[in-house]
Amino acid sequence: MSTNAVAQPTTGTEDEAAAARIRAMRERIDAIDTALIELWQERANLSQQVGATRVASGGTRLVLSREREILEKFRSELGADGTQLALLILRAGRGAL
Ligand SMILES: C=C(O[C@@H]1C=C(C(=O)O)C=C[C@H]1O)C(=O)O
């Protein structure tokens, strides 16, 4: 390896055919992770804008009935992990209370 070579994460197998398949699947995983991060940030920004718009018009920062709907949607699609994920998503959109 030359001194400028970038270290690649190991595939965890010595089998070259399996390693090639793993590398290909990891490309898609990396693309999904990038999309998730972008969507996470876009959603948090939108959620904060909704809250600011509502407060500026005399409303409340949060609407708990709407948050319950979102929690239920994630729970029904993803089970208990969905509930935990939705709680994190909602928290990201709140910013500093
Ligand atoms: C974004 C909103 O404001 C708040 C944030 C929510 C969210 O992040 O989904 C949901 C309800 C509100 O507590 C909204 O009312 O839609």
Image (tube, rainbow, N blue to C red):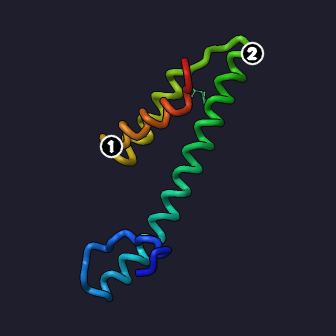
Place residue 44 in its image quadrant: top right
Q: Amino acid at mark 1?
A: Asp
In depth, the one of 97 and 5 nearer the eye is: 5
Instruction: Tell which circle, 1 or 2, labels the residue nearer the N-terminal end.
Output: 2
What is the x, y in percent for residue 7? 41, 71
Q: Residue furthest bottom?
A: 17
Residue tagged by mark 2?
Answer: 57
Amino acid at dot 2: Ser
97 horizontally vs 29: left or right: right
Residue at the image point whose x is 43% and y is 37% from the top? 86
Report the number of numbered marks. 2
Can you tell me which quadrant of the image ligand 1 is in? Answer: top right
Disc 1 vs disc 2: Cβ atoms closer than 8 Å?
no
Tell me residue 27's x, y (percent): 47, 71
Residue 70, given in percent of the width and then of the height, sits at 48, 35
**In the image, 42: left or right of 79?**
right
Looking at this view, name the residue that lies furthest to the right.
57
What is the spatial separation of the Cα atoms under label 1 and label 2, in whole angstroms? 35 Å
Circle 1 is placed at which residue position? 81
| SS for callout 1 | helix
